Image (cartoon, rainbow, N blue to C red):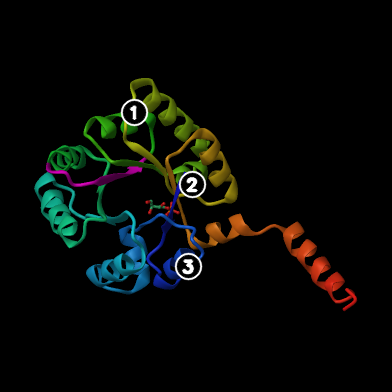
Amino acid sequence: MKIFIDTGEINEIREANALGLIDGVTTNPSLVAKSGKPFRALLDEILAIVDGPISAEVISTDCDGILREGRELAKIHKNIVVKVPLIPEGLKAVKIFTAEGIATNVTLCFSASQALLAAKAGATYISPFVGRLDDISTEGMTLIEDIRCIYDNYGIETQILTASARSPMHFVQAAKIGSDVITAPFGVLMQLLKHPLTDIGLQRFLDDAKKIKS
Ligand code: E4P
């Protein structure tokens, strides 16, 4: 399973990349606004750090606007993936982007039927938001299972990008189900690494090492 980091914070991207953890980056307008940087400048910084797919989201909601924005984004670098909302105008644009060879990440997916339609439009990635489903008392990971089953039934090549992941359990479940990719914030990636028995065990080894006769 590939791992993307879901952030607009350059320090987090740099650290996760140095740890060898990440294969790509996802951003969204909220994360870009939080970074305090202009969108283009932020993308340039990310592209200089990570050599992998970088999702950059359009903010138009009509097909012509999405196409205009997406083509500009795609021109920046071959690693840019145009992130498009899962709305009818978005799917029209995805079909055209696909014909033009522009990679897409269809975002804000909350149902298996939406995921099937995004795949039919030719989406490179589908981003089901599991955490936001959990937030409304729905089992988000069930959606990943459903999409995996449907895509496998028909040999669909659209990659499942588990998004809005909030915990190590989302991560483990996504891997068990066979999600192609997961994107998670820096904090969750760090939680994946931590285990109290690792820390306790290391401390004991270091303490005992002091007793070794020279
Ligand atoms: C996906 O690409 C989104 O950027 C993201 O995962 C949304 O996560 P959130 O629900 O924690 O905002």
Query: In the displayed image of the protein, which residue is found farthest to the bottom?
Result: 214
**Residue 202: which disc?**
none
Tag 2 secondary structure? helix
Q: Is residue 106 magenta?
A: yes
At 18% across and 58% down in the image, what residue appears? 73
Q: Is residue 211 left or right of residue 83?
A: right
The amino acid beneath tag 3 is: Ala
The crowding category of the residue bearing disc 3, from other C-alpha atoms within 10 Å (few below 14, some 14 to 19, many at least 20), is: few
Q: Which residue is mark 2?
A: 131
- Image quadrant in which the C terminus is located: bottom right
Asked whether mark 2 and ligand 1 are closer than 8 Å, the reply comes as yes
Asked if residue 138 can be seen in this view, the reply is no
Above or below, 74 against 137 in this view is: below
Above or below, 97 against 185 in this view is: above
**Earlier-in-chain disc, 3 versus 2:** 3
Tag 3 secondary structure? helix
**Residue 18: which disc?**
3
The amino acid beneath tag 1 is: Ser
Tag 1 secondary structure? helix
The amino acid beneath tag 2 is: Gly
Q: Is residue 183 magenta?
A: no
Q: Is residue 138 left or right of residue 7?
A: right
| Mark 3 or 2, closer to the camera | 3
**Earlier-in-chain disc, 1 versus 3:** 3
At 90% across and 76% down in the image, what residue appears? 213
Which residue range is magenta in the image? 100-109
How far apart are the alpha carbons under marks 1 and 2? 19 Å
Q: Which residue is mark 1?
A: 113
The crowding category of the residue bearing disc 1, from other C-alpha atoms within 10 Å (few below 14, some 14 to 19, many at least 20), is: few
Asked whether mark 1 and ligand 1 are closer than 8 Å, the reply comes as no
Tell me where residue 153 appears, x and y as whole percent. Answer: 38, 20
